[in-house]
Image: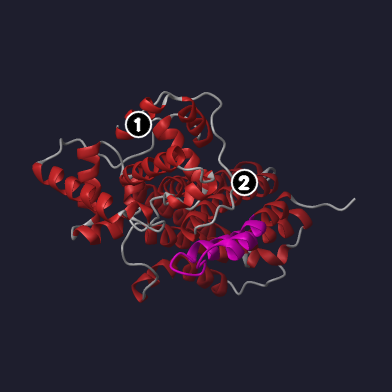
Amino acid sequence: MLFVPLSFLVALFLGIFLVRLLREGRDSWGAHGLFLILIAMYIAQSLLVGLRWGYGLTQVLAVLPILASLMPALSYLAFRDLARERQGLTVSDWPHLLPTLAIALILALGRLPAHLGIPPALRIPVDLMLIATFLAYGAALLWLSRHGPDGLVASRLDGALRSFRALQLTGIALIASALTDVAISLDMLWSGGRYSPAVVSAATTLILLLLGIGAVSAGTEEAGGDVLGEERQGAAHPQEGPETEAAPQSPSTREASEDDRQLAASLDRLMLEKRLWADTDLNLTRLARRLGVPARAVSEAVNRAHGMSVSHYVNTHRITEACRLLRQTDMPITRITFEAGFMTKSNFNREFLRVTGESPSEWRRRMSLLPSGEKVARSAG
């Protein structure tokens, strides 16, 4: 019977999403192409792990640490692009290559024979370098997430929450990878590596899967696709209210100042008069440019004046328009999704449930049963 390592299945899983992203994602190789490169790297690493621990191919040991050292930096750079107005890599980003260059230098100085793998004398400094790299970039990603979804100023507001969760998942997975390496090193010290092969194979496969899911989630949102499929909705309906589904928000402990209220009022007028919510690619950076203020000022004003994140604020406007279309037209729900400014049906369903406590079809059905006078009153409200 043919043995297929689990890491090969992970590579196949990620490969399917990569192909679908390339085929369905709009401008996939644009400003957020780093996520696609990340997915490709995870696929390559998964295949190499399968060859090493599934079939005992030691020749790949020379490549594994070099490729692994690139992943944390690339993960950080990809998410960093979502957290700043200026996109893309620059010459000033070259220091992120230092861990990889250091590991390559250590291996080169040892005159590493490709067919023998990493000599024992080189394994300790290489492992320490990888552990430090994964820990540092994992912590950097979690620090990047401290402002909540609003911190991802270049992320589409339609999918900012999913991108934010992908950011957190990636940071946690990198730290988990570093801790796994520590456990393996201790096993080598105490038991001569008795359990290391099983731990390396299982843990590396799981971590690569988690990292891949994070990259796919963020890449899907920024490419405008919906390759992850529909998100499951809860069986029970939560109570109605603007915060049915709680999401992380930028911390705001101060009450709204007069400047905050004025800026929020200006944004309210802009949203209504210019229908900015209809722009499916709308992000916090674009809103800030229209108002002529820093993105952080817009985020804080919305947080303090409206008590919600910018993504919730904009999506609430979109749901208001969706409700109008559901009530006043026979337009299919799929079309209403895009007319209201959403790129994916899963995000539309999630936000509709958050605001109304019902699915779009249930809400439309309930509205159709109301007396005409009550419908008018609801419409005016």
Q: Earlier in the sequence, mark 2 or mark 1?
A: 2
Asked whether 29 falls inside the magenta stretch, the response is: yes
Q: Nearer the viewer, residue 93 or 306?
A: 306
Is 3 rendered above or below residue 353? below
Is 103 rendered above or below residue 164? below
Q: Position of residue 219 (x, y in %)?
A: 50, 57
Q: Position of residue 247 (x, y in %)?
A: 38, 37
- Disc ID at residue 376: 1
Q: Position of residue 345 (x, y in %)?
A: 52, 46
- Disc ID at residue 206: 2
Residue sticking out furthest to the front: 372
Asked whether 138 falls inside the magenta stretch, the response is: no
- Disc ID at residue 11: none
Q: Nearer the viewer, mark 2 or mark 1?
A: 1
- Dividing the image into 4 quarters, which one contains the C terminus? top left
Task: Give the magenta-colored segment's residue range.
Answer: 14-43
